[in-house]
Image: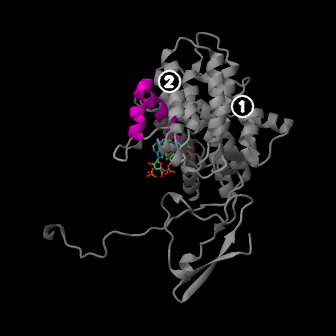
Amino acid sequence: MSNKTIKIIDGDTEAEFPLMEGSEGPATINISSLYSELGYFTYDPGFMSTASCQSTITYIDGDKGILRYRGYDIEDLAENCTFLEVAFLLLYGDLPDASELTGFEDHITHHTLINENLKDLFSSFYHDSHPMAVMTGVVGSLSAFYHDEIDIHDPFDRDLAAVRLIAKLPTIAAACFRRLRGEPFVYPRNDLDYSSNFLRMMFAQPTADYEPDPIMAKAIDLLFILHADHEQNASTSTVRLVGSSGTNPFAAVAAGIASLWGPAHGGANEAVLNMLTEIGSVRNIPKYIDRAKDKDDPFRLMGFGHRVYKNHDPRATIIRKTCHEVLAKLGDHGDAQLQLELELAMKLEEIALQDEYFVERKLYPNVDFYSGIIYRALGIPTNMFTVMFAIARTTGWIAHWIEMISDPNLRIGRPRQLYTGPTERVFKPANDR
Ligand code: CMC
């Protein structure tokens, strides 16, 4: 905390507010006593200038294109770590040593099964339900399985909830996919790593052996790392707000999944592929660029722009390279649609990056512009893309939930409002209205 204060003068009255300095990034004015001192609230829709909490987990510098988990550059983590190594880092603050990593992997591996009764819940959904709707319901239902035994004030219980969530999300996600296809659920296997196990639960058939492709598993693991956390984004803020009431962590994470689903957030990678399908041909790109620039047209270039990154999205830079590598390594399996989508994506990127409208507004391709193409290449259907994001982001959500619940100064999140509705009105019974 610095000794600096910011003074607000309101006529004859003045009040000083402490300036809080973090380890990096802009300083923050602590206005928590503004109302008691001056009788005002602040107004900041979309939280454009408001820090909702203090956090030690993730640092972003949007202008410089920096993303760090617990101080480590995302580029280093993406290059050198597995997803579970990164999950350990996010949860516990430091990278694990070899024995800590083995212990953590073992712990996660032994919590991947879900309660058999959940199968009934899956079958109660309509056959073509969106997998994100099913995920929201199923993850929320975990709070029914693990409620009485969780004391959110006990660090051991919090840790167990974190491990259960990270372990079970891939099993639930794969079950959503199998259900969608009318295929039997595939149980997790303890001899496989996190991402290979996920691929097996997604694609294995009971009638044949299944060997997860190491290139596919590595690409999935990388995408999980890149999506694991992103400080106070909409879904993480949702988990924090919901969790601040002291609710069950599985319910809070289900709320995070619901928030992630929206096309302005995690739904963007699905929207990118839908957009590429709609564009259909390179010659149609200029028409869609014009539509994106037209204020009277709600169409936006999906996968472009970011609330925080106004230079480049470092995740997009890493993933762009992987996108090309995966496609080159998997080879052209004669999937003309996939090749067209990639060609369209590259052309769209090239044109938009030179267009004055996008350059002026600093609208660069974000992580979701490329992640969808990789998922497509791996055989994951479009409506599962946000589910993939949810598997990864669960680690970030639960790390933030733990950080928040462990804070001795935790208070329920309760924003204020600027009321603009009617002032007091005289009530009349129905017959007199
Ligand atoms: N296409 C066309 N115009 C755009 C786009 C776009 N994708 N994004 C922003 N703009 C324009 C916007 O109309 C505005 O123009 P003007 O200043 O003339 O009014 C200006 O750029 C600033 O946009 P904004 O909506 O005020 O920016 P924001 O920070 O509120 O929104 C965003 C950020 C990500 C919601 C937005 O850029 C968007 O909708 N992008 C497409 C959806 C998408 O790809 N979302 C994934 C985000 S990355 C995944 C994640 O981290 O969750």
Disc 1: CA contacts within 10 A as few (<14), some (14-19) or many (>=20): many
Nearest to the eye among marks 1 and 2: give it: 2
Amino acid carrying label 1: it is Thr
- Residue toward you, 187 or 76: 76
Residue 181: percent from left, percent from top: 47, 21
Image quadrant in which the N terminus is located: bottom right
Q: Residue 145, located in which quarter of the rendered image?
A: top right
Tell me: 366 left or right of 66. Answer: left
Judging by the rendered image, the residue that carries numbered circle 1 is 109
Q: Is residue 365 above or below residue 419?
A: above
Q: Residue 172's mark?
A: none
Give yes or no for residue 76 being in the magenta stretch: no
Residue 152: percent from left, percent from top: 65, 54
Q: What residue range appears in magenta?
A: 265-292
Task: Name the dominant secondary structure of the magenta segment.
Answer: helix
| Residue 109 in sight | yes
Identity of the residue drawn at 60% across and 61% down: 51
